[in-house]
Image (spheres, rainbow, N blue to C red):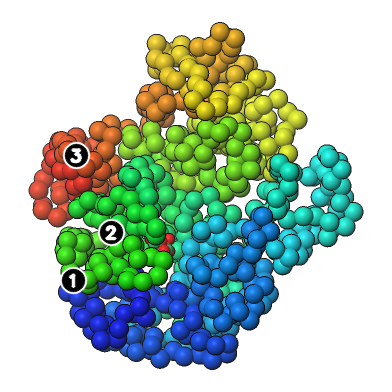
Amino acid sequence: MYIGVDYYPEQWPKERWNTDLELMQQLGINVIRIGEFAWGLIEPEEGTFDFSLFDEALDLMYEHGFDVVLGTPTATPPAWLIEKYPDVLPVDKYGRKIGFGARRHYTVNSEVYQCLSKKIVQKMGEHYGHHPAVIGWQTDNEYGHEQSDRSYGEYDKQAFHTWLQKKYGTLDELNERWGTIFWSQTYTKWCQIPVPTVVYQEHNPSLLLDFDRFCADAYTRYNKLQVDTLRESISDRQFITHNFVYTGLAIDQLDMAKDLDFISFDNYPVWGGLAEPITPAAIARQHDLCRGTKDGKNYWVMEELSGAQGWSQIGYLPRPGHLKLWTYQAISRGAEAIVYFRWRAARYGTEQFCHGILDHDGKPGRKYAEVKDVIASLAPFADKWITSKVQADVAFYHDPENDWAWQIQPQSDQFNYINECLRFYAPAHDLNVQTDMIRGHEDFSTYKVIIVPIYFLTKKHVNDRLKDYVKRGGTVIFTYRTGVKNEDNVVTDLTLPGDVADMAGISIRDYESLREQKRSSIRGISAPLLTHTSPVHVWCDYIEADSAEVLAVYEDEWFSDKAAITKNSYGNGHVYYIGCGVEHDFLKRLYIDIFNNTGIAVHETPSNIEVIRRETSSHSYLTVLNHGVNQGYDVELPDQGQPWKDIETGKIYDRNVHVPRLGCLVCVRDK
Ligand code: GAL
């Protein structure tokens, strides 16, 4: 297994390199990522290439026995480039040019930038494509991050028009599908179509969604330009990857991943001013997204936080133990390599307070000892462990286009896309049920339950596949605001929930956005929810049950006759509809019942405990993580037919295991 560090040799005196590499050797790492921001150094002026610093660094790394991942440095176009070609700078929606001075200051739609990028990538590929230390490449760095996903300048507008022409063919088609008759927006020339810069109030949602699709496609094309350029000269044994983030950007990771050998992810459970890490479920969901990006293929964590992180604000300091816990969580959910960010905290520049394994003083301390311990613990079993696979019974539908449609029209000031996805993910995570993220093209028959959260923007082919899946005996859970839009971001003319109303056996004619602190509440009227109540947030769909059975109703003097949660039989399967933002415990109760009825093993543990299971043909692996910082727990192990063996200590556990605070362990048993 690869375990490594992100290192910036250019940021340290050469005299220090040997010390760093020796310390890395003593630490036990085997891979180093370098180079992703070093454009100015490699091409100090246009057309002049100087590889001397990286030649020296790479040779030294090779001598020390390290493998290297090399970044293409296009996230940081240097000062000379911006001076000479200021038009490559992106433009924000207020029409302001983003300046030079940080990073990601380019638009992928500038042909000049495409040419300059191709040139540096080509030169690097030719120079290092057969270097014995270089095992692979990372293109750019976190496409779209820091709000660099959308640019609204002249080049973007031209490219948008070309993209629209390709998509629609004729203006009549576009006018029809966008409904431009509304407010005199009918276009008679392509050049009249705006990019969505600031207007009074809001643009046409159909235009906005297409603009997001266009931005995502533009990045995919730009990445492909880099990939194709590299492949012209690099050796077959070198891979190409990119380090994604999953925060609702106008980036389509799944689409881009088709051009990559595998995907990578930057894992920061806490960053900037956060007072606490994000929840274990939120971290887990991101890992599930990574695994789902390339059909279940393992991925790399190209940046795994090792110390407190932030630019002008620093928040929570990860406690001793977090580093191992988050590493084990990542591997358990599909990471096959972990690269810690960063080797040593920089003394200058924007990221002075992004702490690393070493702090500014360069002396090995607590974090160095922790990483060393992680590497030593993993060494005996990691290579086998990463060949095992998560076998999920439950799938979550995830489509970035649905995310973008929600961002365009959140409809409630309480709506936040990730939080609402987590509302429906967290109870399954709490029950330690393994989950996959799917886009809709996968083989549904391997799942016992498919949860389709906040499915606002529906797709006909997905709906048809879901119907077929339920008819054959599957179970689907829909949630509030399903079926409202078609793929053009136009509201359906069917009674809600639109195209899936028949399978849900319901009609929705009234609904309400719950704003600010406004809540409603619901009451269960049949098992398993009978007598239980829950406050509800964000949204209420007031449901009329047609063929569906009512499981919960609203406690509302006006709408007490309306259902809040329903269950319908459809073909051989079942469809649930949860019409509101129900609270965690209530939802968990419902999930337990659904999972029990569908033959999915639930494993209840204290909420800080996460249990993940992986399989090979001969072995089962079980990871038990305690995310709590205050107390240890005695955790009952699942599936107790056979004892579990602690892979590190060899101890045999029949029923329970004690997991100290921030503790983690991996167990194994034969099949
Ligand atoms: C990541 C980025 C790194 C560094 C890090 C700081 O998002 O890829 O280059 O900025 O954050 O924590």
Q: Which mark, residue 363?
A: 1
* Residue 648 can be seen, yes or no: yes
Residue that numbered label 3 is attached to: 630
First reached walking from the N terminus: tag 2 or tag 1: 2
For the residues labelled 3 and 1, the Cα–Cα distance comes to: 29 Å
Residue assigned mark 2: 307
The crowd level at tag 3 (other Cα within 10 Å; few <14, some 14-19, many 20+) is few
Disc number lying in front (3 or 1): 1
Question: x and y percent of residue 159 in the render?
Answer: 73, 65
Q: Secondary structure at mark 3?
A: loop
Badge 3 or badge 2: first in the primary sequence: 2
| Sequence order check, earlier mark of 3 and 1 | 1
Instruction: Say which amino acid is labelled 2.
Output: Gly
Circles 3 and 2: CB atoms closer than 8 Å: no
Residue furthest to the right: 188
- In space, the residues marked 3 and 2 are separated at their CA atoms by 20 Å
Q: Is residue 286 left or right of residue 541?
A: left
Ligand 1 shows up in which quadrant of the image? bottom left
Q: Is residue 556 above or below residue 108?
A: above
> Disc 2, ligand 1: is the CB inside 8 Å?
no
> Which of the pair 4/629 is nearer the observer?
629
Residue at 63% x, 58% y: name it.
92
Q: Secondary structure at mark 2?
A: loop
Report the Cα–Cα distance between label 2 and label 1. 14 Å
- Based on the displayed image, in which of its 4 quarters is residue 393 positioned? top left
Whether residue 665 sits left or right of residue 537 in the image: it is left
| Amino acid type, label 1 | Lys
